[in-house]
Amino acid sequence: MGVLMTPDFEQEKELENQYVMHTYGRKPVEFVEGHGMKLVDSEGKEYLDFLAGIAVLGVGHSHPKVVAAIQEQAGKLIHVSNYYYANGRGELAKKINDLMNVNIPEEQVFQTFFANSGAEANEGAIKLARRYADMVGKKDSKKIMYLNKSFHGRTLATLAATGQPAKQDIFRPLPDGFVAMERNDIDSFTSYVDSPDGADVCAVILEPIQGESGVWPCSAEFLQALREETQKRGILMILDEVQTGFFRCGTYPFCFQHAGIIPDIVTLAKSIASGIPMGAFVARKEVAQAMQPGDHGSTFGGNQLAITASLATIDAMIEENVGQNAEEVGTYLKAKLEGLPDVTEVRGMGLMLGVQFAHPIAVDVVMKGLDEGLVLNYTGEDTMRLLPPLICSKDDVDVLIEKLQEIIPQVLA
Ligand SMILES: Cc1ncc(COP(=O)(O)O)c(C=O)c1O
């Protein structure tokens, strides 16, 4: 049986305009099919996708292994609730544990809570940090520090930890107990936590590379120093790997592993299940134990369909060695981007790259790119962000660069 669809794109636009809340500035395209790096719109036009559903389609659109797993599971059992065991949930958590243990100084046991999105994963991590403070007898230590320019989600607590005043101000009052600090400036952490006001900090939350604000990496030195200083003071380190996780940044499964540190809590979502909604927060067992039955929960989180999609996705990532590909093709892409007109800097790692233009042309480049069959993204008027599927090839990069070489001079003219 086919799915009932709105007959044409014009009608779809009218219906959305009338009945869907206007929270997104939509681009004038409706995609109806996707395979690997390619997307097809309702007119049959093909595109190369350098956004991957905002870092979601790690193994590309409609990967055959993921599709087969979802189809089979959907015909058998989709959801029963967290009151019961789900086949494969333990196996998935064990796989995540194994991936977390790559390239860290000392083996750990990591336990996972399954949620539905990145924001929920971060909410859960914040709650866990506060429960851990209770567990270790620091009941008054509930403050969380976060970085300026961060993005951790749209719920109220994650917004309170999002260092972008324009996003925060319209929703005040926000939950309290959140304090900003600077990226790559360890003194802005130590000076606060060592001041009288900072005695009640229980955790720090940060993205190893800030994605939504324009691809701003934390240096390995900063991450290492922050780990050392947090550890000394019994403060938890929460790494938000919602965007950077699952080989996005190259060889290792998670970005923090490039700095060789052991975080206390890591949050995940995006590419974890190829677009079937799933998020997760993962903690060292000692920390995870602070959560007791009844402390936290979710109706959908970690249901049978999501578990199956995630297992198939992670297996495909490992089988196809997407980390190695992200490293190699990412290096190639970065070098090519650096040679483009008007580009002053390319930031990021692997296949998470931010392109800085000298002029405010990012929106025009993205819109012209769409006309030319490229799915691109801007994070600001002078910054373009690329997050292609991790199966992106050098040939795909060559097509992108050839088109950008024509597009950039046109929008500058
Ligand atoms: C680093 C980071 N954390 C959290 C989120 C929020 O995730 P979600 O939109 O799934 O709630 C995002 C989304 O872009 C993100 O990039």
Image (cartoon, rainbow, N blue to C red):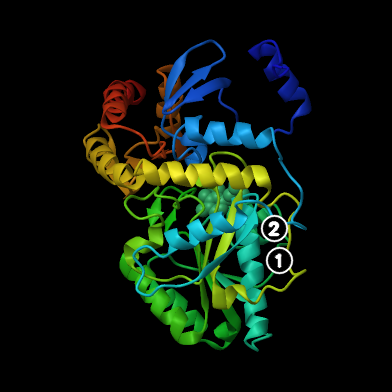
Vertical comparison of 162 with 357: above or below = below
Residue ID at (33%, 50%): 250
Apparent side of residue 35 relative to residue 200 in the rendered image (left or right):
left
Q: Nearer the viewer, residue 272 or 331?
A: 272
Residue ID at (72%, 49%): 300
Dot 1 alpha-carbon crowd within 10 angstroms: few under 14, some 14 to 19, many 20 or more: few
Vertical comparison of 396 with 273: above or below = above
Residue 360 horizontal/vertical position (percent): 40, 36
Q: Quadrant of the N terminus?
A: top right
Distance from Cα at disc 1 to Cα at disc 2 = 7 Å
Q: Are marks 1 and 2 in contact (CB under 8 Å)?
A: yes
Residue 281 horizontal/vertical position (percent): 58, 61
Name the residue type under label 1.
Pro
Q: Quadrant of the C terminus?
A: top left
**Label 1: element kind:** loop
Name the residue type under label 2.
Leu
**What residue does disc 2 label?**
156
Residue 24 showing in the rendered view: no
**What residue does disc 1 label?**
175
Q: Locate residue 196: give its quadrant.
A: bottom right
Q: Does the beta carbon of the residue at mark 2 sit less than 8 Å from ligand 1?
A: no
Q: Earlier in the sequence, mark 1 or mark 2?
A: 2
Apparent side of residue 26 relative to residue 226 in the rendered image (left or right):
right
Residue ID at (51%, 42%): 312
Q: Nearer the viewer, residue 359 or 385?
A: 385
Residue 409 horizontal/vertical position (percent): 29, 24
Q: Locate residue 333: give its quadrant.
A: top left
Residue 357 horizontal/vertical position (percent): 33, 39
**Label 2: element kind:** helix
Q: Nearer the viewer, residue 323 or 222?
A: 323
